[in-house]
Image: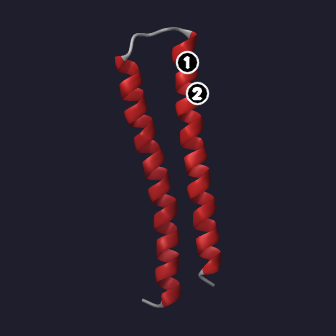
Amino acid sequence: MTGRGKRRLIAVLVGVGGTALALAFVRISLDWSDAQPYEGEATEIRYMVFATIAGLAIIASAVTAIVLWRRAR
């Protein structure tokens, strides 16, 4: 595998790995949250915070993967 191919593989792994990490975070966070007593609005806000953190992690990994991919040229 050439140097360019290795760098592109790393870019793909960063994108996929970041997404997988965000999904694992959501799953673990929701399991923890569901173990807590339901508190109405506070629980719903907690869910939105989890979703926002996961969304930002996916966006960050996608941007990083794109930058790495372009630098591989």
Give the total of numbered labels. Answer: 2
Q: Residue at x 58, y 27 (%)?
A: 48
Secondary structure of the residue carrying tag 2 is: helix
Amino acid at dot 2:
Met
Q: Which mark is residue 55?
A: none
Residue under pointer 1? 44
Drawn side of residue 25 relative to residue 44, left or right:
left
Residue 51: x and y in percent read: 55, 34
Q: Residues within 10 Å of mark 2 (few under 14, many from 20)?
A: few
Residue under pointer 2? 48
Between 66 and 53, the residue placed more toward the observer is 53
Q: Residue at x 52, y 61 (%)?
A: 15
Q: Residue furthest bottom?
A: 2
Are the residues flagged by discs 1 and 2 in contact, CB closer than 8 Å? yes
Q: Residue at x 52, y 77 (%)?
A: 8
Q: Is residue 50 above or below residue 42?
A: below
Residue 72: x and y in percent read: 59, 81
Amino acid at dot 1:
Glu
Give the distance between the C-alpha atoms of the residues marked 1 and 2, in whole angstroms: 6 Å
Q: Give the image quarter of residue 65.
A: bottom right
Q: Is residue 40 above or below residue 10?
A: above
Residue 14: x and y in percent read: 49, 63
Q: Residues within 10 Å of mark 1 (few under 14, many from 20)?
A: few
Secondary structure of the residue carrying tag 1 is: helix
Quarter of the C terminus within the rendering: bottom right
Q: Is residue 62 above or below residue 34?
A: below
Quarter of the N terminus within the rendering: bottom left
Q: Residue at x 42, y 31 (%)?
A: 29
Drawn side of residue 72 relative to residue 14, left or right:
right
